[in-house]
Amino acid sequence: MKKILLIISSFFISVAALADQPKEWQLGFQNAASQSMREIVNFHDNLLLPIIIAISVFVLFLMIYVSIRFRASRNPIPSKTTHNVTVEILWTLIPCLILIVLAVPSFKILYKQDTIPKADVTVKAIGYQWYWGYEYPDENIIFDSYMIETKDLKENQPRLLSVDNEVVVPVNKVVKVLITANDVLHAWALPSFGVKRDAVPGRINETWFKAEKVGTYYGQCSELCGIKHAFMPITVRVVSEADYTEWLTGAKIKFAKEIIEEDQFKKLASK
Ligand SMILES: [Cu+2]
């Protein structure tokens, strides 16, 4: 009964709070905030899930049928049949067909995600043990993003998901994310955007998203990277174009990259 009450109450809570983070008693995916996530959800909900359920129900039915129909008491002399050509052809062909039916739309979505449109904003995410560092290579901005401890949380900040410095991006713009790591494997993942890429030391992976709704979106490191793997969340705040420009102005001062290239050349020349 308690569980049912919790589920019912979670509906009301989710209406008030931003719906782009994990919810208690959540079933299925987080709400999609990009075209590619919508396609993933659509593929999962309307094709994958029905096929999986149908297969599970069919196998369950077969097992129950066999256990009852061929039980020892009803079937004292067991059949000696070992081969049946028709059945063998069928149980090879049908799974093949199912896989093809699944593979075609799946690859379509995968390749679409892989083609990165012309980027409006580029963000570089660097995985560290155990926090994320971000750079805006075109804006001379660099900052680290640490999880906020439970005791320091403010109102409306979800536990284990909020960070001190959020990534800020404009709404309805193509954001290209360059992903790498400094020490071990990490993975930059944001469920609402349908984005997940490994962060590999010495290599840059790229992905992209176009957020369609203003709001705050939460993700987590998704590659086991050590003892504090669970404590390096990802927070992306999607804002309007005007708010983004305003944020940029402040961030360029607050998070300015220290070394200006010109000075570096001077230093090298004087050596
Ligand atoms: Cu990790």
Image (cartoon, rainbow, N blue to C red):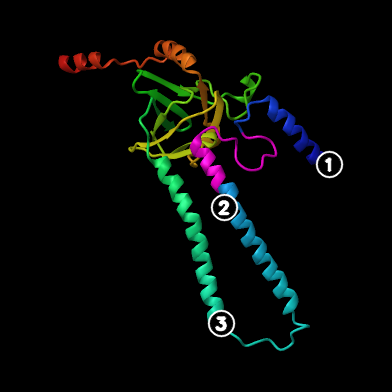
Question: Along the line of sight, which residue is nearer the eye, 77 or 50?
Answer: 50
Which residue is label 3 attached to?
84
Mark positioned earlier in the residue sequence (2 or 3): 2
> Circle 1 is placed at which residue position?
1
Q: At numbered mark 1, what does the secondary structure look like: helix, strand or loop?
A: loop
Q: Which residues are magenta?
A: 22-43
Residue type marked 2: Leu
Residue at the spot 67% in from the left edge and 62% down from the top edge: 57
Residue 227 in view of the camera: no
Q: Nearer the viewer, residue 8 or 137?
A: 8
Residue 84 in view: yes
Q: Is residue 92 left or right of residue 137?
A: right
Q: Quadrant of residue 263?
A: top left
The quarter of the displayed image where residue 261 is located: top left
The amino acid beneath tag 1 is Met
Q: Nearer the viewer, mark 2 or mark 1?
A: 2
The residue under the point 60% across, 37% down is 30
